[in-house]
Image (cartoon, grey):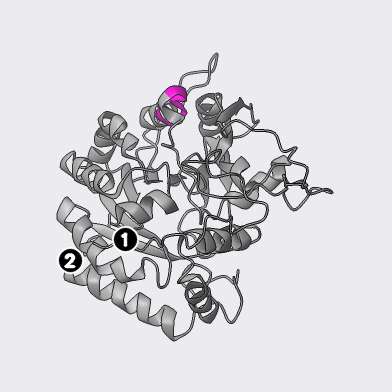
C-alpha cells in the first residue's frame, strides 16, 4: 500500500513554536503550548542573537499519584458503559488525534508533548478497586478499561498496574471490557482467557490504518499494524471475544482503508467491529491541524473541509448522539460503507454480553467472611 505521508517541501519549520524535530523524535505532536487554564503561555523562539541553547531530547517522565477512588462514573447517553478505570494519566503512544489530550490541562500541563511525555501512574489502583467492589450496595456492571488512555502503553511493562487490576477483577468474577492498540495485552492472555471462559472478558483492538508509515507518524509509539492484527489472532485463538475498532475514522486520510481493515481483522479472528469519527474538542483541534500541516500538507485543507461538513460547519460538535459518528451525507456514506464491509466479513453477527451474576464482592482485609 502506498504511503499517504507527504514529503516536506522545505526544511523550514512549518510551525513557528514547534519543538525541534531532533528533540521530539518519535513523538506525535510538534508543540507544547500551555494548557487552557494557564495564565501565561511560554514558547522557545530565536531572538536573533543566536542565544537559543541546545536542549536535550524530550524524555518520558512518570510521576506516581495516589488517588482516593479508581472507578470513574459517567452518564453519557451515547456511551455503552457507565464506569471505567484508567490506570494512567497521559499516554506515551502519542496519537496525534487522541481525544484525551485536553485532560492534561487539569494538571497544569500541555495537552501537546506534555501529554505523551509527562505521565502519571496510579500504583494503588488495585487496592482501591478491591475496596470499591467490596463496598456495601455496589452494583456489578461491566468495567471498561482503556477508554481514556491506553492501559497497555509502554510504561505498563514496568508498573504492571493493569495486570494487578485484572487480578482483582478475576478474583471477584467481575466483567471487564478492554480497548487497546498495544500488543502487550497478550501478556495477560492467561487471565483474560480464564475470564472469557466464564463470559467475563472481551477485548477490542484499535486498528487505525494498515499503512506502517502513516501509523508511525499518527501513532508513533503504538504497535505496528501487523502486530495489532497478530494480537487479534492470538486473543481469538485463546478464546477471548475480540473486536476491531477503526478509531478514529479520518476523512481523506484513513477512511479509504475501512474495507481493508475490516477484512484483515476478520481474517485474523475478530468477531466484532466498531468505529468512531475523528473528534477535535478543545486543544486537539489545533494540535491535529498542526500535525496535518507538518505530515500531509497536500491534503490538510481537504481533511478539515470534510471534517467540518460532518460537524455542521464546525471543527467539532459535542452534541450527544452525533459526536461519535458525525452527521450529513459524508458521515452517512462512511457509516453505510462500514456496515456493508462488516456484514461482508461476518462481523457483528453475534453479540457477547458479559455476565454479572457470577460477581462475588471481595472481602476487605480484616473484614468478615460471607456466610453464604
Say which residue appears at 40% left-offset and 28% top-offset: 163
Left or right of 103 on screen, residue 220: left
Q: Nearer the viewer, residue 48 or 87?
A: 48
Mark 2 or 1, nearer chain start: 1
Q: Secondary structure at mark 2?
A: loop
Which residue is under mark 2? 345
Q: Nearer the viewer, residue 211 or 43?
A: 43
Q: Secondary structure at mark 1?
A: loop
Q: Residues within 10 Å of mark 2 (few under 14, many from 20)?
A: some
Which residue is under mark 1? 3
Q: Position of residue 297 (x, y in %)?
A: 49, 67
Q: Is residue 151 visible?
A: yes
Left or right of 109 on screen, residue 150: left
Find residue 296 and report its image quarter. bottom left
The disc label shown at residue 346, or none: none
Say which residue appears at 23% left-offset and 62% top-offset: 1
- What count of labels does the image hold? 2
Work out which residue is located at the far bottom of the displayed protein and give it: 329
Q: Position of residue 266 (x, y in %)?
A: 19, 58
Work out which residue is located at the far right of the displayed protein and give it: 39
Q: Nearer the viewer, residue 341 or 250?
A: 250
Q: CA distance from mark 2 to mark 1?
A: 25 Å
Q: Position of residue 174 (x, y in %)?
A: 40, 37
The residue segment tinted magenta is 158-163
Say which residue appears at 65% left-offset and 30% top-offset: 68
User: What quarter of the picture does the C terminus occupy?
Assistant: top left
Amino acid at each position: 500500500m502506498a504511503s499517504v505521508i507527504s514529503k516536506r517541501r522545505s526544511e523550514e519549520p512549518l510551525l513557528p513554536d514547534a519543538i525541534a524535530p531532533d528533540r521530539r523524535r518519535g513523538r506525535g505532536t510538534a508543540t507544547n503550548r500551555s494548557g487552557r487554564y494557564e495564565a501565561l503561555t511560554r514558547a522557545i523562539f530565536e531572538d536573533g542573537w543566536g542565544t537559543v541553547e541546545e536542549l536535550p531530547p524530550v524524555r518520558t517522565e512518570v510521576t506516581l499519584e495516589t488517588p482516593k477512588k479508581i472507578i470513574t462514573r459517567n452518564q453519557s447517553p451515547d456511551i455503552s458503559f457507565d464506569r471505567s478505570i484508567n490506570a494512567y494519566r497521559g499516554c506515551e503512544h502519542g496519537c496525534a488525534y487522541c481525544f484525551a489530550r485536553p485532560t492534561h490541562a487539569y494538571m497544569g500541563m500541555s495537552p501537546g508533548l506534555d501529554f505523551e511525555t509527562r505521565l502519571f501512574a496510579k500504583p494503588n489502583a488495585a487496592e482501591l478497586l478491591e475496596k470499591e467492589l467490596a463496598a456495601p450496595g455496589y452494583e456489578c456492571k461491566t468495567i471498561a478499561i482503556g477508554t481514556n488512555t491506553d492501559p497497555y502503553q509502554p510504561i505498563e511493562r514496568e508498573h504492571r498496574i493493569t495486570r494487578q487490576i485484572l487480578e482483582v477483577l478475576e478474583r471477584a468474577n467481575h466483567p471487564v471490557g478492554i480497548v487497546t492498540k498495544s500488543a502487550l495485552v497478550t501478556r495477560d492472555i492467561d487471565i483474560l482467557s480464564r475470564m472469557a471462559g466464564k463470559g467475563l472478558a472481551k477485548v477490542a483492538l484499535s486498528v487505525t490504518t494498515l499503512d506502517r508509515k502513516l501509523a508511525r507518524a499518527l501513532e508513533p509509539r503504538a504497535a505496528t499494524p501487523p502486530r495489532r492484527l497478530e494480537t487479534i489472532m492470538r486473543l481469538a485463538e485463546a478464546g477471548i471475544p475480540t473486536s476491531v475498532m477503526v478509531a478514529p475514522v479520518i476523512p481523506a486520510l484513513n477512511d479509504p482503508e475501512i474495507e481493508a481493515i475490516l477484512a484483515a481483522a476478520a481474517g485474523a479472528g475478530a468477531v466484532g467491529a466498531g468505529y468512531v469519527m475523528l473528534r477535535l474538542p478543545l486543544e486537539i483541534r489545533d494540535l491535529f491541524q498542526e500535525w496535518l500541516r507538518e505530515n500531509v500538507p497536500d491534503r490538510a485543507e481537504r481533511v478539515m473541509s470534510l471534517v467540518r461538513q460532518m460537524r455542521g460547519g464546525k471543527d467539532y460538535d459535542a452534541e450527544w448522539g452525533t459526536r461519535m459518528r458525525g452527521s450529513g451525507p459524508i458521515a452517512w456514506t462512511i457509516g453505510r460503507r462500514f456496515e456493508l464491509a462488516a456484514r461482508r466479513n461476518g462481523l457483528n453477527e453475534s453479540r457477547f454480553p458479559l455476565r454479572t451474576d457470577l460477581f462475588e464482592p471481595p472481602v476487605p482485609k480484616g473484614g468478615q467472611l460471607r456466610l453464604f
